[in-house]
Amino acid sequence: MKRQQKKHPKFDIDGWLVLDKPVGLTSNDALSRLKRLFHPKKVGHAGTLDPAASGCLPVAFGEATKTVPYVMDGRKVYRFTVRWGEETDTDDTEGSVIETSDMRPDTNEIREILPEFTGTIEQVPPKFSAIKIAGERAYDLAREGQEVEMQPREIEVHRLDLVDMPDSDTAVFETECGKGTYVRALARDMGRRLGTRGHVVELRRLLVGPFGEDDMVTLEELAEAAEEAETPVEALEAELLGLETALEALLEVPVNRNDEARLRRGQGIILRGRDAPILGGEVYVTCQGRLVAICTAEGGELKPRRVFTVGAAEA
């Protein structure tokens, strides 16, 4: 008879961890490693990285999962290396070469076209991407050999810089871009525009929303911390960032204890007094440094959209 594996107790862990994802793991693989190390009750990540990419993978534990959309909507910064002369069906090293060219662009030619790929532009996503077509992932259809027609989408590229040219075959770029931008497609389209072909051979994400390189920690460092600590919570204590870190784009509104109690019950509040701000849109509410809720503000009224239980004051 097969022996049942003993279930490990789950732990209440709340906060953001910024993982330096290594090359070779999917984002979900990395998440599974964290689950095995720390056994959290709830965990998720904010923004998938391809297995061939490394770098910033923000991971939300517990109550931080309520703030994931605010991180995913934030700007992202990537550093990537393009190899000229070959285009692949995946637009990176994972795929097969489908087009070649002997043409190699020089520094001036590359810099001249960069403004065309900056600002609000249209981009056709790679066929090997997670975009859904008639309910199916594009990469699943492509792997089955089906003809996948990707529709162009509007994206925002805030910055695209040539930072190095190690040799005539390769160029290193850095880009700051908005949600939905595919760096692989940028490399493919720049190659075509330059009269050659191109694909990404190295990709590293440096920033997602408020989380950057200074916040990153590796799986090896986390495994070592888990080995030395008595509990998973203790192991993560030095690395976890507060829930409100994800909300930097929102205005903070401090309230008193009575208003905190109402918001935590899901009730709206009115900001009173001569100095009460007239607000509009989303804000986050704190009380004595504790995160209480994300609210919709209409004039002087705050209506809770997401209420946080961690750090709630005792009655």
Image: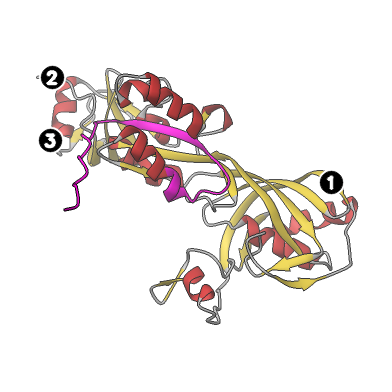
In front: label 3 or label 1: 1
At x 56% / y 27%, what residue is drawn? 214
In the image, which disc is placed on residue 182? none
Name the dominant secondary structure of the magenta segment. Answer: loop
Tell me where the magenta segment starts and ends, as one range.
1-30
Residue 118 visible at all? yes
C-alpha span from label 1 to label 2: 59 Å
Q: Work out whether 142 lies above or below 91.
A: below
Q: Position of residue 292 (x, y in %)?
A: 25, 30
Q: Which residue is mark 3?
A: 265
In front: label 1 or label 2: 1
Q: Which residue is mark 1?
A: 165
Give the secondary structure at mark 2.
loop
Q: Work out whether 218 lies above or below 179.
A: above
Give the secondary structure at mark 1.
strand
Residue 282 visible at all? no
